[in-house]
Image (tube, rainbow, N blue to C red):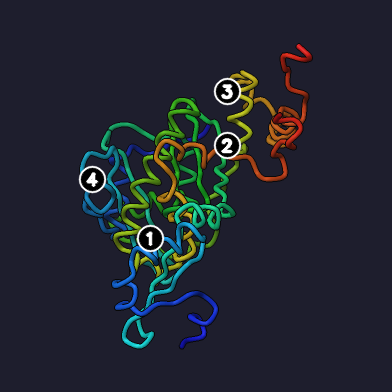
């Protein structure tokens, strides 16, 4: 069973332990946003992430994996260790957090969902390559016109 | 005359100010970018017709990747390294658009900073998003790659 993702409050705890800087609200397009943005300059580049104001809620496990891998650039183990010790994570980490979830091209999901009216549950049951094939078929199949209707 | 000015129509700032209407006509009606210089070419800027610039940037295609897990739809936009989520695809896409808007505002406001980082390559994507009408921005994230665009006889 997959361990639950942390709450947004725990993500904030990590960012504070790892010495991220909170960006002022107006730096990211006004004060009425649903997100709080952070950044950290490392020798390998500029890292940025955001958390939700809903501090008691959690992102899904898949979203958390993506945040770790692509934005925080730490593994799960280092994430929890930084919270436990209150000290910054060591970077670069030995191995990136895996991101095992299937990835579908957004343009193809859009076609299947909104043109072919296939539910997200049914799309998720398909392989990503099949989703692209079906979306491509949508473009090449003859369109009904008044002449051939 | 600088090399750049020899390739592109150029004006000094004082000339451009005196002939601003003609300069704009050249850029807009004749589709000719104009370089404007001051301090003997030490400072330069370029004027470019908006839709020509949009066309120039159209090759910077966004290719968001969608995953479904634990009742959440998650979208990763690799081009700007943003991650959005929602209960369904549309919600996640709405959040992504909001995040890209916020990122673009910050990127443009701190352009000199970003251009010194590993995010310098984000600039054309931010420019493409910023130069797209707000009502058309959603389309940027569901744009099919050119190899699947329908041939013209199908569209007719």
Residue B31 locus on image (x, y percent): 51, 60
Pointer 1 chain: A
Task: First in sequence, mark 1 or 2: give its number.
Answer: 1
Task: First in sequence, mark 4 or 3: give its number.
Answer: 4
User: Nearer the observer, disc 1 or disc 4?
Assistant: 4
> Mark 4 — residue?
A30
> Mark 2 — residue?
A106
For the residue labelled by badge 1, is the local secondary structure a helix, a strand or a loop? loop
Q: Mark 1 vs mark 2: same chain?
A: yes
Q: Quadrant of residue A42?
A: bottom left
Residue at 28%, 50% (x, y): give it: A28
Q: Are marks 1 and 3 in contact (CB under 8 Å)?
A: no
Q: Mark 1 vs mark 3: same chain?
A: yes
Pointer 2 chain: A
Task: First in sequence, mark 1 or 4: give its number.
Answer: 4
For the residue labelled by badge 4, is the local secondary structure a helix, a strand or a loop? loop
User: Nearer the observer, disc 1 or disc 2?
Assistant: 2
> Mark 1 — residue?
A89
Task: First in sequence, mark 1 or 3: give its number.
Answer: 1
User: Nearer the observer, disc 3 or disc 2?
Assistant: 3
Measured along the vertical axis of the image, is residue B87 above or below residue B23? above
Task: First in sequence, mark 4 or 2: give its number.
Answer: 4
Q: Are marks 4 and 2 in contact (CB under 8 Å)?
A: no
User: Nearer the observer, disc 1 or disc 3?
Assistant: 3
Say which mark, if any, is on residue A114: 3
Q: How far apart are the alpha carbons under marks 1 and 2?
A: 33 Å
Q: Mark 1 vs mark 4: same chain?
A: yes
């Amino acid at each position: 069973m997959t361990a639950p993702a942390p709450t947004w409050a725990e993500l904030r705890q990590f960012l504070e332990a790892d010495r991220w800087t909170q960006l002022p609200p107006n730096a990211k397009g006004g004060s009425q946003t649903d997100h709080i943005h952070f950044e950290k300059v490392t020798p390998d580049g500029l890292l940025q992430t955001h958390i939700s104001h809903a501090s008691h809620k959690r992102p899904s496990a898949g979203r958390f994996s993506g945040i770790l891998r692509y934005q925080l650039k730490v593994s799960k183990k280092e994430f929890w260790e930084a919270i436990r010790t209150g000290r910054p994570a060591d970077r670069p980490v030995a191995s990136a957090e895996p991101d095992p979830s299937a990835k579908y091209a957004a343009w193809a999901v859009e076609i299947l969902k909104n043109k072919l009216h296939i539910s997200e549950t049914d799309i998720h049951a398909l392989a990503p390559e099949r989703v692209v094939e079906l979306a491509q078929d949508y473009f090449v199949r003859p369109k009904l016109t008044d002449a051939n209707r | 005359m600088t090399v750049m000015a020899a390739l592109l129509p150029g004006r000094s700032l004082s000339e451009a100010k005196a002939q601003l209407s003609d300069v704009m006509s050249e850029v807009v009606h004749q589709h000719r970018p104009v370089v404007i210089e001051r301090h003997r070419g030490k400072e330069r800027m370029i004027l470019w017709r908006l839709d020509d610039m949009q066309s120039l940037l159209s090759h910077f295609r966004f290719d968001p990747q969608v995953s479904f897990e634990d009742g959440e739809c998650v979208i990763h936009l690799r081009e700007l390294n943003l991650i959005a989520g929602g209960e369904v695809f549309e919600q996640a896409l709405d959040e992504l658009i909001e995040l890209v808007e916020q990122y673009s505002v910050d990127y443009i406001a701190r352009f000199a900073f970003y251009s010194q980082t590993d995010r310098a390559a984000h600039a054309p994507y931010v420019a493409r998003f910023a130069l797209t009408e707000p009502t058309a921005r959603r389309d940027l994230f569901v744009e099919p790659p050119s190899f699947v665009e329908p041939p013209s006889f199908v569209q007719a």
